[in-house]
Image (tube, rainbow, N blue to C red):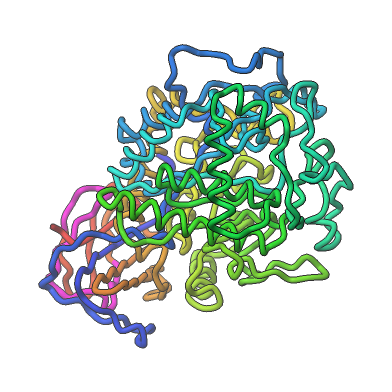
């Protein structure tokens, strides 16, 4: 097994309080501790991001929909992944073992029926970002019955579900997918990203119609949608639902509000817990504020109608994809001629495009201190989503998958929300011969390796143990970081919420075999702890823990 350089000590404190004024020397815990349920804390979540079409095929029928039978470029067609496949892995406990407590998957609304040639071979909307009808699910991904089952089963396991929402654009125009009306979309100019205006009032790429989200005038439902709904026998139902929405909100019947209505319907109907907003900086920020208002309303209404299904009092959670935003920017994103605070316009969290660079360039202490200081200072009350690879980032932290152990250690121990992109935990290859562009990042999940490759199984085991540790201890992602010792490098994380308190001691770059680390004043002598990595139990003596394991990682928690 590839040597990692990590020692982790952890102690879960329940129903004790922590004096945050003493950030230099956290208080010692009491020996007698009551048991309480670990709360779900979005700011410390372990989130799993998957491409719906590329994760797992749970439909043995292998059906083709909308005559999508043309030959495509490599990895640019539908590969068969679907909601049933995600359900299958939920049932098998795959996410439980990985410590995942939130799942985000790519959009599942109905996509354009045909494909387009982007210079990389024909491409279908397998990725979900080319909407044709926001009010319907694409049968390639599954049915609303599947979605209801998925959410229900995920919630039964304490796992939150986050959908992916696109408001900025429709799908491309093809011979059978007509362009939306002129009062709905623009087809030019193409964005040059040199100013706020030339980032928002433009098309991302050629032949990707841009929704007129700045428009506040009334528009009608596009004729092709009316015809489609009538053929499907749901025209009256859809129109009545739209009438009720606009009457309740008082919004004009503008394009953005139709889409907001369609997206928030999934909250009302299924009780999803969050949305990741796609291409956020290409839409006026006020639109996202309205979106969050309607998300909150829908989530509140779902809870009122389904009181027995409510998990907790967490509010609806939103994550913004603002391309090139980094944690160093704090709350503002700079367009050059204008700065926008998306946290103040509907978002709890922003995807942190900077993390992969920080993870490669900073020391452990530099990385952890920077993130803790930002999240408990300028960004207090908000969070960022850290990742090492994703579906559209061509420069991941570890493109050749030679640092899978290190990647897991850094991602899962850094303050903020961790995003595991499907296959990070199994070393799924990001270099696929014969692909063009981002297709190389989007291969099918390597389930055969998980089943039969010993090295893949070892990598997965490493991610599982760290993931479970993060899940059980909100202090890891949502806590305050404090260095205890430089050599050996030891630090603490502390977190409190109401009567719940969690303290963690972590050591890195220690030797395998016998080792001892100081624990400061985090917990008292005589405390019984268990190493979740090796399964061994220890006792704290003289302000330290002496360990002897075959691993260079130790995860100590209160022995129950």
- For the image shown, how many numbered marks are present on the structure? 0
Name the quadrant containing residue 464.
top left
- Residue at x 73%, y 32% (from the top left corner): 223
What residue range appears in magenta? 517-537
Q: Nearer the viewer, residue 168 or 72?
A: 168
- Residue at x 28%, y 43% (from the top left corner): 156
Q: Main secondary structure of the magenta part?
A: loop
Q: Nearer the viewer, residue 545 or 337?
A: 337
Where in the figure is residue 92, as x and y percent of width and height? 31, 30
Q: Is residue 536 magenta?
A: yes
Name the quadrant containing residue 402.
top right
Where in the figure is residue 397, as x and y percent of width and height? 60, 48
Left or right, 248 with respect to 328, comes to left
Where in the figure is residue 88, as x and y percent of width and height? 36, 28
Where in the figure is residue 113, as x and y percent of width and height? 68, 23
Which quarter shows the C terminus? Answer: bottom left
Q: Is residue 340 visible?
A: yes
Q: Nearer the viewer, residue 174 or 491?
A: 174
Left or right, 272 with respect to 280, comes to left
Q: Is residue 405 visible?
A: no
Which quarter shows the N terminus? Answer: top left
């Amino acid at each position: 097994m590839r040597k990692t350089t990590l020692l982790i000590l952890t102690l879960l404190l329940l129903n004790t309080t922590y004096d945050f004024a003493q950030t230099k020397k956290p208080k010692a815990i009491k020996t007698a501790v009551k048991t309480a349920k670990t709360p779900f804390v979005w700011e410390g979540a372990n989130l799993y991001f998957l491409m719906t079409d590329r994760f797992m095929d749970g439909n043995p029928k292998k059906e083709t929909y909308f005559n999508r039978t043309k030959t495509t470029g490599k990895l640019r067609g539908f590969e068969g992944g679907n909601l049933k496949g995600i359900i299958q892995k939920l049932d098998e406990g795959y996410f439980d073992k990985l410590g995942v407590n939130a799942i985000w998957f790519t959009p599942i609304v109905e996509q354009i029926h045909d494909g387009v040639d982007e210079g990389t071979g024909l491409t279908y909307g397998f990725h979900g970002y080319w909407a044709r009808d926001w009010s319907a699910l694409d049968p390639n991904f599954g049915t609303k019955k599947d979605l209801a089952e998925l959410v229900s089963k995920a919630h039964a396991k304490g796992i939150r579900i986050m959908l992916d929402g696109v408001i900025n654009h429709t799908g491309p125009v093809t011979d059978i997918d007509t362009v939306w009306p002129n009062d709905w979309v623009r087809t030019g100019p193409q964005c040059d990203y040199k100013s706020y205006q030339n980032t928002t009032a433009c098309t991302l790429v050629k032949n990707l119609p841009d929704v007129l989200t700045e428009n506040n005038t009334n528009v009608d439902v596009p004729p092709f949608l009316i015809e489609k709904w009538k053929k499907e026998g749901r025209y009256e139902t859809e129109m009545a639902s739209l009438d009720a929405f606009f009457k309740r909100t008082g919004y004009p019947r503008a394009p953005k509000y139709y889409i907001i209505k369609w997206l928030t319907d999934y909250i009302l109907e299924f009780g999803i817990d969050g949305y990741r907003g796609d291409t956020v900086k290409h839409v006026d920020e006020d639109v996202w504020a309205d979106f969050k208002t309607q998300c909150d309303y829908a989530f509140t209404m779902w809870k009122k109608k389904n009181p027995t299904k409510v998990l907790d009092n967490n509010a609806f959670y939103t994550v913004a994809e603002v391309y090139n935003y980094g944690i160093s920017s704090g709350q503002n994103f700079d367009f050059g001629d204008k700065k926008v605070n998306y946290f103040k316009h509907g978002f709890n969290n922003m995807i942190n495009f900077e993390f992969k660079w920080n993870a490669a360039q900073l020391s452990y202490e530099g990385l952890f201190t920077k993130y803790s200081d930002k999240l408990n200072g300028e960004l207090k009350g908000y969070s960022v989503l850290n990742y090492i690879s994703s579906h559209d980032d061509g420069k991941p932290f570890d493109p050749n998958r030679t640092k899978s152990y290190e990647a897991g250690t850094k991602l899962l121990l850094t303050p903020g929300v961790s995003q595991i992109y499907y296959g990070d935990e199994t070393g799924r290859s990001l270099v696929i011969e014969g692909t063009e562009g981002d297709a190389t990042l989007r291969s099918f999940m390597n389930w055969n390796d998980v089943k039969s490759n010993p090295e893949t199984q070892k990598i997965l085991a490493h991610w599982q143990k760290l993931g479970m540790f993060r899940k059980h201890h909100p202090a890891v992602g949502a806590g305050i970081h404090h260095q205890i010792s430089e050599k050996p490098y030891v630090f603490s994380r502390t977190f409190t919420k109401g009567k719940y308190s969690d303290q963690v001691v972590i050591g890195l770059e220690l030797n395998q075999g016998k080792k001892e680390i100081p624990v400061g004043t985090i917990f008292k002598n005589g405390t019984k702890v268990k190493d979740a990595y090796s399964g061994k139990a220890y006792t704290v003596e003289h302000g330290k823990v002496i360990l002897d394991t075959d691993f260079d990682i130790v995860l100590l928690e209160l022995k129950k």
